Amino acid sequence: MNLLENISTSVKASFEEKSKDFEYRRALNTKFARAVERPCISFPERDWQNTLIAEVKLNSPSGGRLAKEYENPADIAFAYVEGGAQAISVLTEPLFFEGNLKYLEEIRFRVKSVPLLMKDFVFDEFQIKEGRAYGADGILLIAHLVGDELSDLIDYADSLGMWALVETHSKDEVEAAISAGAKIIGVNNRDLETLEVDLDASVNLCKYIPDNLVFVVESGITYPEDIRYLKDECVRKPDAYLVGTSLMMSEDKEKKLKELIEA
């Protein structure tokens, strides 16, 4: 099995366990009832600057441990906001990325002004409900993973007041996302099967994303030059950039963010 298959197998096993745990479901329902009293924060408006979605990711299957021992997720997110991030992506998958839903909750408590994206390997409405309960405003849906369920999952997120970022990596997936009603489409420059990164994935696919939809570039952005390349080569300018590993590895996250925003 490739990495995506390994991760999805693990996630589904965890889902089966949690969804059958009566005490967990009861606690989740209580948390959810409180959470829905807070309106979700919308995805950032299109800006003249570079809109950055900064990712809190403690570990990466391809890059290993990213966070320093003294760093905690809420502090990292706060530094991102101080540096100008307009949204925060939070990895919650535990086995491969060392994520946790409680990190999402801790960041929500610390960061009030910007939207939070729950980034996980979502395939069921139950997981979207978890995201809302723990403070997420948006949810990542990987087109390749959810397949024919994409439209239903987008609709369910919308029913909870959330927005969905639909991740794609091929023309067929972009077209499927559009057909499913996606309003925010991301192009992942990382091939989840080979882990290879190529910025030209965004360059090649952006032309299939209508101008009235939001186009997000995901993965592979390390330097300001990368953003300038994308702005020059994409037939339509990206509306936002999701950046994780290079920010996590930076000693001065605020400075790094400002450099990318001003590229």
Image: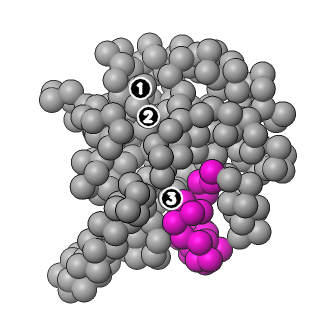
Residue at left 29%, top 80%? 16
- Residues in magenta? 141-169
Kindly indicate whether the residue at mark 2 contacts the one at mark 3 (C-beta within 8 angstroms): no
Task: State which tag comes first along the sequence, 3 or 1.
Answer: 3
Residue type for callout 1: Leu
Closer to the observer: label 3 or label 2? 2
Q: CA distance from mark 3 to mark 1?
A: 21 Å
Residue 151 point in image, percent of width and height = 65, 74
- Disc 2 designates what residue? 244
Q: Residues within 10 Å of mark 3 (few under 14, many from 20)?
A: many
Q: Quadrant of residue 149?
A: bottom right
Element on which disc 2 rests: loop
Closer to the observer: label 3 or label 1? 1
Residue 35 point in image, percent of width and height = 39, 65
Q: CA distance from mark 1 to mark 2?
A: 5 Å
Vertical relation: 74 (above or below) 5 = above
- Disc 3 designates what residue? 139
- Disc 1 designates what residue? 247
Q: CA distance from mark 3 to mark 2?
A: 16 Å
The one of 25 and 226 positioned closer to us in this rendering: 226
Residue type for callout 3: Ile
Residue at left 78%, top 26%? 233
Magenta-colored stretch includes residue 107: no
Q: Residues within 10 Å of mark 1 (few under 14, many from 20)?
A: many
